[in-house]
Image (cartoon, rainbow, N blue to C red):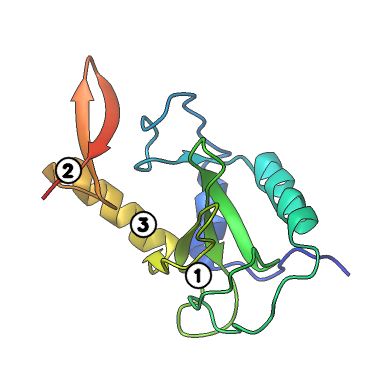
Amino acid sequence: MSRFPVAWPGDLVRFYQLHDGAYSGQMWSGILPGWDLLSLDAMISTMEMYAEIFPDPSTAAVEAGETAFDFLPSFVPIAEDGTGCTLFVDTRPGDRFGCVTGFMHADADTYGPIWESVEAMLDDVADALEHGRPSGGWQPTVEDNALTWEPAYD
């Protein structure tokens, strides 16, 4: 039996039908604020890496969006930030099925979902770019025809 999830949200399927990663190679310059999109191959490699780190993940948190403290087989990594932190789609059952959450080194997934779905993530980023407002705590800027994201301070 595969350790990887079978059922993906429709917007995640469409997301990968449109691209196969977008590695910028420069911190904070990707289309997502602070994240480089993973290719399908990189996604699988990342899932395999986490499967080795968390061979017997906790199953106490069963609903999508709940803190698991472990990287679960139902977490589909879609991006990384260059420091080893991962952005993932939570495919566990529940009202928040398909939410997008960050998995950080020391804090695991304790901050909860950043966006309710891949579609909400893309809408938020598109709106930030169109209106020059922050997304996920990052302000888009364009300099010399290149997009970068700077920390947004209140």
Q: Tell me the CA gap for discs 3 and 2.
A: 14 Å
Viewer-nearest residue: 153 or 26: 153
Q: Which corner quadrant of the image does residue 45 belong to?
A: top right
Residue 149 horizontal/vertical position (percent): 28, 35
Of the numbered discs in the image, which one, if any, rests on residue 115?
none
Query: Where 111 sits versus 77, above or below?
Result: below
The residue pinned by badge 2 equals 130
Of the numbered discs in the image, which one, if any, rests on residue 98?
1
Instruction: Kindly identify the residue that appears in the image at 29 percent across and 53 percent down.
Output: 136
Left or right of 101, for residue 70: right
Residue 23 horizontal/vertical position (percent): 52, 30
Q: Nearer the viewer, mark 2 or mark 1?
A: 1
Residue 147 horizontal/vertical position (percent): 28, 28
Q: Secondary structure beneath disc 3?
A: helix
Q: Secondary structure beneath disc 1?
A: loop
Q: Earlier in the sequence, mark 3 or mark 1?
A: 1
Tag 1: amino acid: Gly
Tag 2: amino acid: Glu
- The extreme top residue here reads 144
Residue 152 horizontal/vertical position (percent): 19, 44
Query: Where 131 sits versus 143, above or below?
Result: below
Left or right of 113, for residue 62: right
Tag 3: amino acid: Met
* Quarter of the figure with the N terminus: bottom right
* Label 3 Cα neighbours within 10 Å, binned few <14 / some 14-19 / many ≥20: some
The residue pinned by badge 3 equals 121
